[in-house]
Amino acid sequence: MARDAITPYSRGPNTQRKYTALRQLKSALGVEPKYFDVEVGAAIASGVSFATLTPQLRNPRVLLGDDVFNRNGKKITLNRVMFRGSIFTTPTTLGASASPCSVVRLFLWRNDQFGSPNDFVGMADGTAYANAAVALGGFQSPNANGYGKIVDDQTFVLEPTAAVNNASATTASTVAKECPVVLSYSPKKPMTLNYQAASVTADPDKWFTIFGNCDATTFSPSLNGVMRFYYTDA
């Protein structure tokens, strides 16, 4: 009985074997998922511009080190950004009439260049808005495109807990209901963030921050919560 011809084994180039070995090693060892938290607690102002609500503008400022929440080298691979918190209000002096609802707009901003540009939201010609209500409805201006992007954008309505809070109806409530807030961003593919060499608290070349604005300060709103960055060492 005739046998089939034997096909000689053909080895690939050395580079192919090296990359295959690295992939096998990475698969065997696995990649340690990490996260870095930033506490957020800031008042949401009423004005013609959006105020920064995060305590550190260039986030995530991941420390260099060997602990579970540190980065090992000069870069990380960012997989997701998540903020969970609430909009709280501070009770103010009771008024003689029912307090109206207030509108709060929050957005998560991704900056794609090193530095701190301040014209995140504005008119096309770069001038300021006329008032808070107009600013609240505005979106990022055309001259802002190219160095950043709004990756999550939400609007919340602060409702009074009660129109009138006594039997004689002489005073009105200025306390609003608590609003839960979730802002989230997952890039289409993991993002590489580069840090300065030999610096423990270096700023990344890309960063994220939360901006907010309110059409009135009737309820003295503030944003409180935790901004979490999910990443792995690159």
Image (spheres, helix red, strand yellow):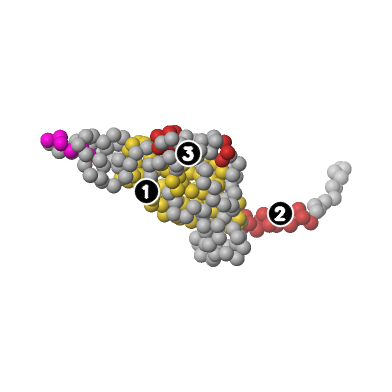
Looking at the picture, which amino acid does disc 1 mark? Ala
Seen at 44% across and 46% down, the residue is 51
Give the quadrant of residue 161.
top left
The image quadrant of residue 38 is bottom left
- Judge the density around disc 2: few (<14), some (14-19), many (≥20) Cα neighbours within 10 Å: few
Mark 3 and mark 1: Cα distance apart in space = 21 Å
Place of residue 165 in the rendered image (x, y in percent of width and height, measured from the top left): 18, 38
Q: Which mark is residue 20?
A: 2
- Which of 115/30 is in front? 115
Q: Secondary structure at mark 1?
A: strand
Q: CA distance from mark 3 to mark 2?
A: 56 Å
Query: What residue sits 22% from the left and 37% below the top?
Result: 162
Q: Which residue is mark 3?
A: 128
Check disc 1 and report the residue beneath it.
43
- Eye-nearest disc, 3 or 1: 3
In terms of depth relative to the viewer, which is nearer, 48 or 195?
Answer: 48
Q: Which residues are magenta?
A: 168-173
Q: Nearer the viewer, mark 3 or mark 2?
A: 3
Corner quadrant of residue 27: bottom right
Residue 166 is situated, as x and y percent measured from the top left of the image, at 15, 38
Instruction: Return the disc, 1 or 2, that comes first in the chain's sequence.
Output: 2
Q: Main SS type for the magenta part?
A: loop
| Residue 60 rendering spot, x and y as whole percentages | 51, 54
**Residue 189 appears in the rendering:** yes
